Image: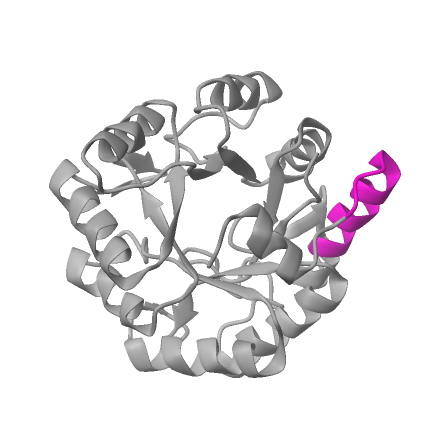
Amino acid sequence: MDKLVIVAAMTGAETTKAHNPALPASPEEIIRSAVECRKAGASMVHLHVRDDQEQPTQDVEVFRKVVEGIRRETDLIVQISAGGAVTATADERLAPLVLKPEMASLTTGTVNFSDDVFMNTPSMIATFAQRMKELGIRPEVEVFEVGMINNALRLVKKGLLDEPLHFDFVMGVPGGIPGTVKDLLHMVESIPAGSTWQVAGVGRAELTLGAMAIMMGGHVRVGFEDNTYYSKGVPAENNAQLVARMVRLANEFGRPVAEPAEARQILRLK
């Protein structure tokens, strides 16, 4: 197996300090959380940012401040979310890509997202993929159900995505694929040979699916975007605590954790 790549999704667009007071919201808090996650064993951060009222924003200057701060303080791979919040327009979601992060998320389908709809029409998906290709950004193909894998493969045929692909299975969102081991096996068996993949288990699915990914040769995403608890009824102290748990599990299973430079090789980044 490749060494384990651990991704920290520290903030998200839906989580608030009401869910967990330790949520990093300001640029300074997000940068500090990234530094803590790097020390704990993460090799990549998946970025959302917030405005002065702690609301999700796609403001390029806020992203710039956070990206530059993380690059100044760490050697982490920086991945910008092109998903934004469910209320963001396509143009707003695309805007931060001008910062040319090493990676960006590319969601390849529309999904019910709890009481909302996360809209990704075929034309939007193609536009996002084309923009990432123009800027030299490696897409992380973000899928909430199995049909989105086929959508990604159609983009390959159109020349908008290049294989091998890297997939992020977001599992356990109300409206998407359940966060079960059976469903994870189905997702992994549905992607092309040679692809890399990671799992982002939402809520209580984070720990179980993370452990399975470690044993199956996949990679892991953890953090307050997906889950704010360490165990049932016990809030996590910070994002780094969730990263550190995956490092301990990897050590128990005998799978080394990748440093950022090693993760860049595994994920075929330039």
Per the picture, the main secondary structure of the magenta-coloured stretch is helix
Q: Is residue 241 left or right of residue 220?
A: right
State whether residue 255 is above or below residue 53.
Answer: above
Confirm whether residue 67 shows in the render: yes
Q: Is residue 143 left or right of residue 124?
A: right
The image quarter containing residue 144 is top left
**Residue 28 among magenta residues:** no
Near-viewer residue (185 or 264): 264
Residue 219 position in % (x across, y down): 61, 41
Residue 74 position in % (x across, y down): 62, 75
State whether residue 4 is above or below residue 25.
Answer: above
Give the residues in magenta. 243-256
Picture residue at 77% right of the left edge, 55% below the top: 244
Residue 20 position in % (x across, y down): 60, 61
Near-viewer residue (51 or 135): 135
Confirm whether residue 51 shows in the render: no
Near-viewer residue (223 or 267): 267
Picture residue at 12% right of the left edge, 42% below the top: 123
The image quarter containing residue 101 is bottom left
Residue 76 position in % (x across, y down): 59, 67
